[in-house]
Amino acid sequence: MNNLISAEDAATVLNISNSTLAKMRLSGKSPRYIKLGRRVAYRPSDLEAWIEAQSFNSTAEYSEKAVL
């Protein structure tokens, strides 16, 4: 459990603001997260998997995924 990343640190890793990450959680578009009481945390492996899922080879590929 020592390898959990805070929401603030996850936002830094993703190069987005903490409020953007919070909005992404509300819309269901964020990386998987863990809720510990009021605290939100992320596993490094979940961040890596989410980043990998955001990679595309072409805009057509992005359009196909967005439809799903």
Image (tube, rainbow, N blue to C red):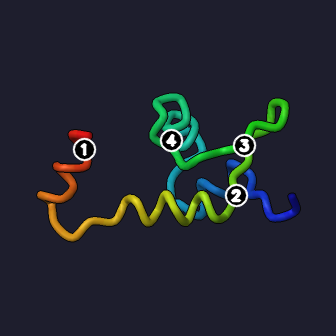
Quarter of image, res 60: bottom left
Query: Given the current orientation, which residue lies at the most extreme left position?
Result: 60
Local crowd size for mark 3, using a 10 Å CA cut-off: few (<14), some (14–19), many (≥20): some
Real-space CA distance between mark 3 and mark 4, rounded to the nearest whole angstrom: 17 Å
Disc 3 is placed on an element classified as: strand
Kindly identify the amino acid type of the residue bearing the numbered disc 3.
Ile
Kindly identify the amino acid type of the residue bearing the numbered disc 1.
Ala
Q: Which residue is mark 3?
A: 34
Disc 4 is placed on an element classified as: helix
Disc 2 is placed on an element classified as: loop
Q: Residue at x 80, y 64 (%)?
A: 3
Kindly identify the amino acid type of the residue bearing the numbered disc 2.
Arg
Disc with the residue nearer the chain's start (3 vs 4): 4
Real-space CA distance between mark 2 and mark 4, rounded to the nearest whole angstrom: 18 Å
Q: Which residue is mark 2?
A: 43
Q: Residues at badges 1 and 2 in contact (C-beta under 8 Å)? A: no
Disc with the residue nearer the chain's start (2 vs 3): 3
Disc 1 is placed on an element classified as: helix
Percent across and percent down for residue 2 are: 87, 62
Local crowd size for mark 1, using a 10 Å CA cut-off: few (<14), some (14–19), many (≥20): few
Where residue 56 is drawn, which disc sits there? none
Q: Residues at badges 2 and 3 in contact (C-beta under 8 Å)? A: yes
Q: Residues at badges 1 and 3 in contact (C-beta under 8 Å)? A: no
Kindly identify the amino acid type of the residue bearing the numbered disc 4.
Thr
Percent across and percent down for residue 13 are: 59, 64
Quadrant for the C terminus in the image: top left
